[in-house]
Image: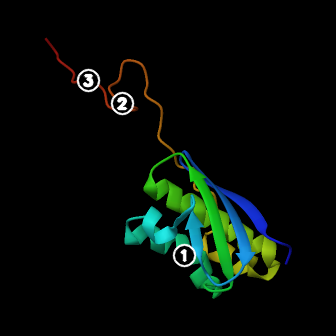
Amino acid sequence: MAEYVESIGRRKTATARVRLYSGTGEIVVNEMPMAEYFGRDLDKMILRQPLALTGRDTAYNISVHVRGGGEGGQASAVRLGIARALCESDPSLRPTLKAAGFLTRDARAKERKKAGLKRARKAPQYTKR
């Protein structure tokens, strides 16, 4: 493996730049330990899913720069970035990650507000008289 493998993951308005180094399993997000950056256990679990599935929990040190969006979107963006980086470092992992759905970019995003409506689809209450 070269010095590191880099990839990008996106979800909603969050973008994560992930670098995979060979190492001991340390994950650093925006210069902070992952456990400190992501408060919810669900986000930490989402983030580790591709590593756990492939059995590479302690094979790599991961450095992440993530911006935009909220905690959930950022965690999902990092997961996609890690999955893509794993594929790049070891192409034999691709079928496993693809089957689990970790290589698919979740395109769902907030729908824009429309004119005359309160939100994207909620209309003001109709009055007959």
Q: Earlier in the sequence, mark 3 or mark 2?
A: 2
Disc 2 packing (10 Å; few <14; some 14–19; many ≥20): few
Disc 3 packing (10 Å; few <14; some 14–19; many ≥20): few
Quadrant for the C terminus in the image: top left
Q: Could you tell me which residue is drawn at 41 percent across and 70 percent down?
A: 42
Q: Could you tell me which residue is drawn at 45 percent across and 50 percent down?
A: 70
Q: Position of residue 28 (x, y in %)?
A: 58, 68
Q: Amino acid at mark 2?
A: Arg
Task: Name the residue beneath numbered marker 3.
Answer: 124
Quadrant for the N terminus in the image: bottom right
Pick the front one: 44 or 27 = 27
Residue that extends furthest to the right in the rendered view of this protein: 2
Q: Is residue 58 above or below residue 129?
A: below
Residue that extends furthest to the front in the rendered view of this protein: 31
Pick the front one: 98 or 58 = 58
Q: What is the CA distance from the residue labelled 2 to the residue labelled 1? A: 35 Å
Task: Name the residue beneath numbered marker 2.
Answer: 119
Task: Name the residue beneath numbered marker 1.
Answer: 48
Q: Nearer the viewer, mark 2 or mark 1?
A: 1
Task: Look at the numbered discs 3 and 2 and tell me whether their residues touch, using CB distance below 8 Å.
Answer: no
Disc 3 on helix, strand or loop? loop
Disc 2 on helix, strand or loop? loop
